[in-house]
Amino acid sequence: MRTIFITVGSHGDVNPFMAVAGALHRRGHDVELVANPTFADKVASAGLRFCPMGERATMSELFGRHPEMMSAWKGHDTILEKLVLPTMEPIAKLLRERFASERRPDLVVAHGGCFAAKWICDEVRAPFAVLTLSPLNWFTDADSMSDPRFGTLSPDRRLDRAARGTVRWLVRAKTDRQLNPWRARLNLQPTERIVADMFRGGTLNLGLWSPMFRPPRAGDPDTGIICGFAREDRHDHATNPDALEQFLASGPPPVLFTLGTALSHSIRGVSEQAIAACHRLGHRVLVIDAAGPPDERVVRSELGDARPDACHVARAPFSQVFPRCSAVIHHGGIGTMAEALSAGKPQLVMYAAYDQLDNAERARRLGVAESLSVHRVSPEKIQTRLQMILNERVRRHASLVADLLRREKDGAEVAADALESIAAHRS
């Protein structure tokens, strides 16, 4: 089976695609992964064939220049303008060339932001699968959903149902208006409900989260399958690994702080406040932040000469580091959430936009997390919520969740089974 995987976004978007593509590759299928050139070395280290798409742009460059990309109110428009729309023509050109060649792909698997991939597959009537990374994107009426702009919308309240309808109408009207001109540029006819068609259509719609995190609901996509978390960081390497190992081995498990790739370049000063909160509670701190170490001047201004035993590294594989920590403070990205749940650690989620609050609320309902807006943090608020999760009850729930996740089949393998079924059906 010849399969093309296409994704946009940060490491949190690329890693699940590498996991599923890797599962098919290990089964002997011909796999190609298309992404921004900045991920070339990362994909190659996993033994996958890589195809660069668009101009090279690191996440630090992109989100550093456009911090509004992580805004709850401005982020969707900015992401569309800066990250999604520039890929339209490159994706269409690539797929039209591939489908016209002798080595025509049997299947295209794309990120929900790669609209042109579905459009071209519809044009040539080729099988298409979308990998949906978090439950919020299925936007199912029977499910409770949370958004930093609107709060939690319950399926049981009439007002919340009306709000869902309004949000749906606004998304449909706005995005159809923004995306149909790009369909015209690609010589395609205008259409309606473009976002809903992307996240609820396709030959397959694979939800890459655990059914314990969010089980099947009435109204899920007709072609939807919840596969499980697709975790992949085996090919990530820690910066300064000797110092990291020495720190982890030299004392009790620290609290880990990270805001992920995108948010760490969009907002600064949060790690210093987290360090201050941990210091007041007597905990060591490990900061993983690609944007740079905490500002020593700010830390000492807050704490004086006394500061917690702290360590900073730019990068480290979460699957190896999280199990050695006492708790995880993070931004609520689905990949980081999956690693924290799998490690069995209490979590404090500092959310900003997109699916982050929704993921935090699902973890809170599992009894393993509390949340706080990253725009409203203070050492006092962080300290209060850390005290809420650093207790035996939350630790016990987190351990139980991790045990149940270990009994589930790997989400990447379940997704690979489903993708193989397309080829079997067509043959």
Image (tube, rainbow, N blue to C red):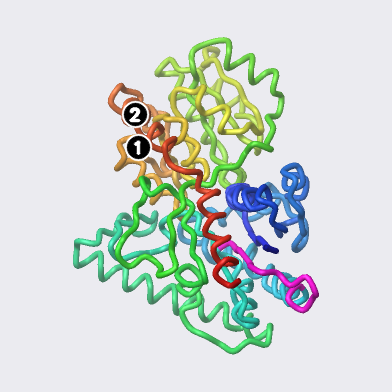
Q: Residue furthest top?
A: 250
**Amino acid marked by disc 1:** Glu
Q: Can residue 10 be seen by looking at this rendering?
A: no
Query: Could you tell me residue 231's position as x and y percent?
Result: 55, 43
- Under circle 1, the secondary element is strand
| Residue at 32% in and 31% down | 397
| Residue at 31% in and 40% down | 366
**Snapshot quadrant of residue 380:** top left
Query: Could you tell me residue 114's position as x and y percent?
Result: 61, 67
Q: Residue furthest front?
A: 427
Q: Is residue 87 above or below residue 37?
A: below
Q: Earlier in the sequence, mark 1 or mark 2?
A: 1
Q: Tell me the residue that label 1 is attached to.
A: 370
Per the image, is 105 magenta?
yes
Query: Could you tell me residue 52's position as x and y percent?
Result: 77, 59
Q: Which residues are magenta?
A: 98-111
Relative to 262, is 51 on the left or the right? right
Q: Is residue 96 above or below residue 236?
A: below
**Snapshot quadrant of residue 405:** top left
| Residue at 70% in and 64% down | 2
| Residue at 19% in and 62% down | 157
Viewer-proximal residue among 125 and 359:
125
Q: Tell me the residue that label 2 is attached to.
A: 389
Relative to 162, is 172 on the left or the right? right
Q: Is residue 63 above or below residue 298?
A: below
- Under circle 2, the secondary element is helix
Q: How would you rate the neighbour count of disc 2 (Cα within 10 Å): few for under 14, some for 14-19, many for 20 or more?
A: many
The answer to whether the residue labelled 1 contacts the one labelled 2, judged by CB atoms less than 8 Å apart, is: yes
In the rendered view of the protein, which quadrant contains the C terminus?
A: bottom right
Per the image, is 71 magenta?
no
